[in-house]
Amino acid sequence: MTIRKGTPADAVQIVPLLQEIVDAGGTTAFEGTVPLDFLADILDGSTSRAVVHVADVDGEVLGFQYFFPHDDDPEETATIATFAKLGGTQRGIGSALFSATRKAAKAFGYSQIDATIRADNLGGLAYYARMGFVDHHVRRAVPLKDGTPVDRVTKYLQL
């Protein structure tokens, strides 16, 4: 497995990988159709202080992780998201991606990373805890498109 910086060419694998996760439901706050230009501004480098890393095995993207400046505190805090191909968990993809992300976030001068996870995504909560993230706050009963309320847990990692 190779962890590398994503490029615009990776979008043809990133979008369907995420769409499959969205369609399965229960682990991401994303709902509906993933736009074809999802992450285009990060992949092409037009968003400053942001990176997509991909886990690549023989040209197949098995997972990706990205970060970008946090809206409320862009100087200090990056926001992160991580996705692995369904059925591909437990292969060390997340840990390998995070190693590259941590280094890149430090190089960009961030002092902390924010991860917000659905409270019913037990795997995601466990993953970020393993990476060293600690609970910061909970937004209660954020409705899904169908109205179902789901808490959002925000965790922070000091770099």
Image (cartoon, helix red, strand yellow):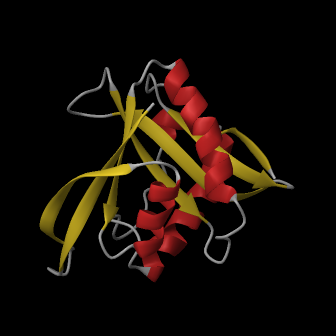
Q: Nearer the viewer, residue 133 or 118?
A: 133
Q: Nearer the viewer, residue 46 or 150?
A: 150
Q: Above or below — where is 105 with respect to 79?
A: above
Extreme-right residue of the structure:
58
Q: Residue at x 55, y 48 (%)?
A: 65
In the rendered image, residue 107, in percent from the top left (x then y), is placed at 55, 19
In the rendered image, residue 69, in percent from the top left (x then y), is placed at 35, 30
Rendering quarter of residue 80: top left
What is the total number of numbered labels drawn onto the structure image? 0
Q: Residue at x 45, y 51 (%)?
A: 81
**Residue 45, can we see it?**
no
Q: Nearer the viewer, residue 38 or 138?
A: 138
| Quarter of the image where the C terminus is located | top left
Q: Nearer the viewer, residue 4 or 133?
A: 133
In the rendered image, residue 123, in percent from the top left (x then y), is placed at 48, 71
Rendering quarter of residue 109: top left
Q: Residue at x 46, y 39 (%)?
A: 67
Residue 90 lies left or right of residue 46; in this view the side is right
Q: Above or below — where is 141 with respect to 66?
A: below
Residue 113 lies left or right of residue 140; in this view the side is right
Q: Residue at x 43, y 56 (%)?
A: 35
**Residue 28, can we see it?**
yes
Q: Above or below — where is 8 with respect to 135?
A: above
In the rendered image, residue 122, in percent from the top left (x then y), is placed at 41, 74
Q: Above or below — where is 111 with respect to 138?
A: above
